[in-house]
Amino acid sequence: MRIKTIVRTGLALCAFMLATPAWTQDSGSDPVTTPNGDTLDMGQPVDEAREPGTLYVDEVFDDWARRCVYIPDGEDVCHLYQLLKDDEGNAVAEFTILKLPDGLQAAAGATIVVPLQTLLTQQLTIRIDSAQPKRYPFKFCTVTGCVAQIGLTKGEVAAFKKGAKATLLIVPAAAPDQVVGLELSLKGFTAGFESLHATSQ
């Protein structure tokens, strides 16, 4: 009997709110009491001013997100970001890339984070479509994963722009005879990378 009462009360409340749409548009902070005695919290306005160092998503380019760090007295530092997932949709790795100033051997810098259970001695291999792969060492591990910080030449950035996907190859520590391939989509990379301002950070 109690369950039926709760269901009836909930349905009545939903119907009452749908019948009074002005309530959902009210930005006031005073609670509202419905005819059946329920109290509705109308919420409090949130100050949207960002704190220094806040990381936020500025724009999305297909499979890439442009994420920026808020700098009050200067230009925000932005980079492209993609979360890599396995075949079952589980988050496995992160790929972050930023544009570097002209004149350097590297046109872009990338940070890749992979699971802690990765066999570090086998390093990280990246292949763009069917091109020859390239291997990079890991630099350190944190509680969130193991990190490789790599440089990409102008030609490699151009390959990213022309390519359809890149594959990150890692070896699990628990299965050193196996190689795990993680797909990095390059859809939207060109527009996203061109939107970045070069940074030395």
Image (cartoon, grey):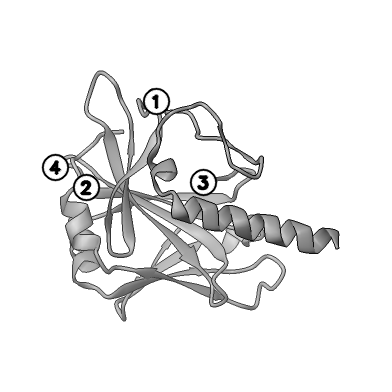
Does the CB distance between marks 3 and 2 fall below 8 Å?
no
Q: Name the residue under label 2.
A: 105
Extreme residue toward the front, this view: 35
Image height check: is 35 above or below 190? above
Relative to 104, 44 lies left or right: right
Amino acid of disc 2 = Gln
Amino acid of disc 3 = Lys
Q: How many marks?
A: 4
Q: Name the residue under label 3.
A: 139
Q: Which residue is depicted at the point 19% across and 61% down?
A: 190
The residue tagged with tag 3: helix, strand or loop? Answer: loop
The residue tagged with tag 2: helix, strand or loop? Answer: loop
User: Of discs 4 and 2, which sits in the foreground?
Assistant: 4
Whole-number angstrom distance, CA of label 4 to CA of label 2 = 9 Å
Whole-number angstrom distance, CA of label 1 to CA of label 2 = 43 Å
User: Of discs 3 and 1, which sits in the foreground?
Assistant: 1
Q: Which of marks 3 and 4 is nearer the N terminus?
A: 4
Q: Which corner quadrant holds the C terminus?
A: top left
